[in-house]
Structures are given as C-alpha cells and as structure tokens.
Image (cartoon, rainbow, N blue to C red):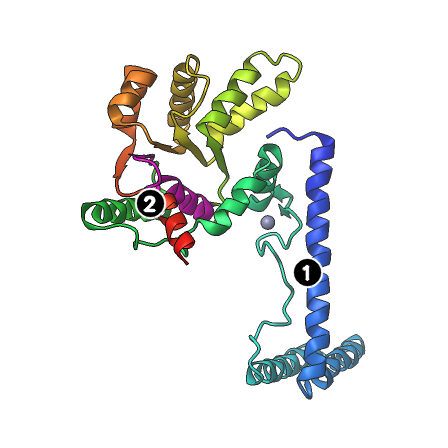
Amino acid sequence: MALTNSQYETIMREYENRQTRNRHLLEERTAEIYRQVEGYREIAESIAAISVSQGKKLLEGDEHALEDLKASIRSLSSMKEQLLTGQGYPADYLSPVYDCPSCHDTGYIDGAKCHCFKQAVIDLLYEQSGIRELLEKENFYTLSYEYYQGEDLTRFEKAVDEGRKFIKSFDSDYHNLFFYGTVGTGKSFLSGCIARELIETGHSVIYFSAAGLFETMSRNMFDYKNKDDVLSFHEDLETCDLLIIDDLGTEYTKNVAPSMLFSLLNQRHLNKKSTIISTNLSLEDVRNRYSDRVFSRITNQYFICKFTGPDIRMLKKRLQNRK
Ligand SMILES: [Zn+2]
C-alpha cells in the first residue's frame, strides 16, 4: 500500500505516542505497587544491587558469577510475583505494557512491517474511526439471541455458527459469506462481529457501505490527477484479507454498480481473498439488479445465509422508550 511521507509520519507518531503512554502507565503502576505492597521496593532494589556486584565479579574472572546471578534473580523475581498476587494483583502487573506484543509498539519486526502497521495504514487511508466505534458495540460479547424466536432463531444461530467457522478457518481456507434478509435482522451486526475478531488477530479488514464503496469507485474513475492513490486504493480493495460490503442495494450509483461489483468480486476471487456481502434485497432482486454473472458468482462462491425476524433496531428502541 502506498503511503505519502506525511501519512507515514502520522503512523510513526502514533507508535511513539503508544510507547510514551505505556511507559507512563508502567511508571504509575510501579509507584502504586511501591506504595501499596510492603517489601516490594526492597526486593526490586536488591535485584539491581546484586546485578551490579555480580557484574563486577564476572569482570574479575569469577566464572560462576553469571549462574549465581541468574539463580538469585530467579528466586527474587518469584518473591516479587508472590507479593503481587498475595495482594490481589496479576503476576505480570509490572511487566512492560504493549498495545501490540508482536512488535512492542514499534511497527516493525526484524525490519519487516508488523501486522498492526498494516491495519494502521488501512485505518488511516479509509478513516475507519467510525467503524472502530461501531465494532466496540457490535461484537461476539454483545451478541444476543433474545430477539429471535422459532425459525428466525434457528436461522440466526446457523448464521452465527457459519460466522464462527469462517473466522476459525480464515487462515487455511478461502470462504465468502452472503447475508440477506429483511431490515434489522442482524446481518451488519454479524459482519461487524467477524470484522472485529479478524482485526484483532492481525488481519487487514476494509469495511464499506455499498453506497460509500461505489461512490468512491466511480469518483475515482475520472480522477486522473491522483492516479497513484487511485491505483493503490483499488489494489487495497482487491488484496485486503477481508472486504465487507454492507447494505448492497442502497447505493445511488445504480448504473455503474453491477460492472464494478463484478470486477471487484472477480479480482478478489482470483486473489483468493474473502468477502462478506450483506443486503436487504431478495435473491431475485440481486439477480435483476446486478446481472446474471454477479448472481452466479454469489451462488457459486458464497455461503448464503438468510436472516429473518422482527426489525431488532426498532424493537430495541421500543424497549428503551418503555423503560
Ligand atoms: Zn505490531
């Protein structure tokens, strides 16, 4: 993915901010433990003192110094842990804190970009702060079956099941999902759940409403000035690990959408990159609106889940008003 210098700097500045924030957090925690846990500070300080004196011995040629040092640090460290857990703190409470343990918030692992860097680029390029907020609310922890009954419930359970399988086999198998059904039956919610799980395991996820996607794509068609940006935008769409197209059918660009959709789905299929599409349209409407070739792509290459039931958003609103 192509980045301008200022975009690159923005991302690197964010890494610096993370490091500073986490360093302060650790300092605060250390001060707290020194105040609250009697004897902890003394042990920490004696580890430092022993290290210095063993270092001296090592320089003087004492071959056992290193072994001795390791053994004393081990026993002192376990004493520290016992003190912490004895007071109800987690054993690793004073270990360094990282947003991303893989790269220690540097963005790089052995000179190569970390998975978190890739997602930072995507966030920046697509200003996904909106989706981030959405994903706070829409995830498997907040998933609920209470609004569904009978056949609706069975269908929803099956879709959730498929969603979980999709996540589990994401790295080994190439799959696509197609969610269709009436408004407010949980399609976008489930897409959001899947997106979040995959983002958290370091996959690059791009989320678009169909309206936003086709509008951006058609604007790009005539953007000759920023050709490089447009090219890299299309490359991202075609190569990101997961593309979510939400609310297919709500776009205004009705005449160009079918051919754009076909070439995008086709390219992703060639790249073996997964896509999730959700729509309020019926299958028949999808065929009529996006042509037979799009329809046959979807029926052949997508696992199709039907959603039914009451409009949950309306239901929730009504319940809230009653309170
Ligand atoms: Zn990282």
Q: Are marks 2 and 1 in contact (CB under 8 Å)?
A: no
Question: Front-most of 183 and 236?
Answer: 183
The quadrant of the picture occupied by the C terminus is bottom left
Span of residues in magenta: 175-198
Q: Residue at x 30, y 53 (%)?
A: 145
Relative horizontal placement of residue 173, taking residue 241 as reference (left or right): left
Note whether 135 is above or below 254 in the view shown. below
The residue under label 2 is 163
Secondary structure under the numbered disc 2 in the rendered image: helix
What crowding class fits label 1: few (fewer than 14 Cα within 10 Å), some (14-19), or many (20 or more)? Answer: some
Res. 22 mark:
1
Q: Position of residue 23 (x, y in %)?
A: 71, 62
Secondary structure under the numbered disc 1 in the rendered image: helix
Note whether 298 is above or below 108 in the view shown. above
Residue 235 seen: yes
Q: Quadrant of residue 155?
A: top left
Relative horizontal placement of residue 218, taking residue 191 as reference (left or right): right
Q: Position of residue 234 (x, y in %)?
A: 52, 23
Question: Front-most of 255 and 96?
Answer: 255
Q: Position of residue 151 (x, y in %)?
A: 18, 46
Q: Residue at x 40, y 31 (%)?
A: 247
Q: Is residue 197 magenta?
A: yes
Note whether 279 is above or below 318 in the view shown. above
Q: Position of residue 15 (x, y in %)?
A: 68, 48
Q: Residue at x 52, y 41 (%)?
A: 131
Residue 200 seen: no
> What amino acid is found at the position of numbered circle 2 in the picture?
Gly
Note whether 133 is above or below 287 in the view shown. below
Relative horizontal placement of residue 190, taking residue 85 as reference (left or right): left
Q: Residue at x 43, y 43 (%)?
A: 192
